[in-house]
Amino acid sequence: MSAPSSDAILRRLEWTVIRRLDGLLQGDYRTLFRGAGLDLADLREYQLHDDVRHIDWNVTARLQSPYVREFTEDRELNAWFVLDLSGSVDFGSQARTKRLVSAEFVAVLARVLTRHGNRVGAMLYGDQVEAVLPARGGRLHVLNLLQRMRDFRAPTTGSGTQLHRLLEAAHRMIPRRSMIFIVSDFISAPGWQDALARLSQRHEVLAVRLYDAAELELPDLGLVTIQDAETGEQLFVDTHDPGFRERFAKAAEEHEERMHQGFVKAGVDTLELATDDDLVDAVLRFAEMRRQRSRLAAGGGLPAHLAPRASWSATATIGGRP
């Protein structure tokens, strides 16, 4: 049986996911996707809960009092999907791989965005940035993005993922303030944390972390050959050995801790997306994160730029990784 076309996949997602979201969110996507105002409207004195990024330092220096810029709202939102499609995302211990989960998540959010007049762009990474799709609107553009993700094949031999290169490229190539989704399993060489922090200073960034349960706790499968999907290196291991599984779990736990410390250091919100996750639940978790962030920014708590980011990682993982 031939694989379904990209159009058939998108139609299925429109009927099974987006229609459910329309009902659950009652069609109100405004709090999720609001454009960042870019047209200067006025200057006023700084008040508690204001975003410090809007301080006009020249006026502040002249008047010896902090002043912030006010903007008229730009309702058109530019969103970018910065996509790690390296070899490790082809893994999945059950029916769905991380690549499939990534493609469906991106297709759903891209279609929701373009339906409401916004534009989406994408950067595709294997072992380097292989393609950049400029931000555009419309269903055909979403279909093209989905097809490019399905056709993309990363090299099977190389030095492994260098995620910082993708993030640095995004910083260079996306000059206008945008909402950026970093969709990756974050299995990478060190050094991506600083690049992610720089990206989040200019843009609103959400780290969408892909994972499979078998990457956290190795099942007892007996003697198996494990191959690194990115370097081609192979190891023959005995998964029946409790000591080996314990060491594997400890190494996975240490990686998890380093990764989440990196998110906190970079100051970005995170959404955990497992290969067995329900896509509607995942988008609803994202919706709740946005609502809470909007309430804080409006003065319902700490200002957004001072809110403790670690708590947002915990909020984002409801229904996913504990």
Image (cartoon, grey):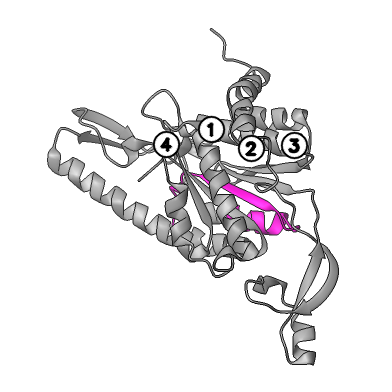
Residue type, numbered disc 1: Val
Q: Give the quadrant of residue 167.
A: bottom right
Cα separation between marks 3 and 4: 34 Å
Give the secondary structure at mark 3.
helix
**Residue depicted at x 45% and y 26%:** 96
Give the class, few, some or many, for how many residues have Cα within 10 Å of label 1's Cα (few <14, many ≥20).
Answer: some
- 153 and 49: which one is in front? 49
Please tell me which of labels 3 and 4 falls first in the chain: 3
205 is higher (above) or lower (below) than 47: above
Instruction: For residue 298, say whether it is visible.
Output: yes
Give the secondary structure at mark 4.
loop
Please tell me which of labels 3 and 1 falls first in the chain: 3
Cα separation between marks 3 and 2: 9 Å
Instruction: For residue 191, say whether it is visible.
Output: no
Read off the residue under disc 1.
280
Give the class, few, some or many, for how many residues have Cα within 10 Å of label 2's Cα (few <14, many ≥20).
Answer: some
Give the class, few, some or many, for how many residues have Cα within 10 Å of label 3's Cα (few <14, many ≥20).
Answer: many
Please tell me which of labels 4 and 1 falls first in the chain: 4
| Stretch of the chain drawn in magenta | 166-190
Whether residues under marks 4 and 1 lie with C-beta atoms below 8 angstroms apart, the answer is no
Read off the residue under disc 2.
109
Please tell me which of labels 4 and 2 falls first in the chain: 2
Read off the residue under disc 3.
114
Read off the residue under disc 4.
229
**Residue depicted at x 13% and y 37%:** 241
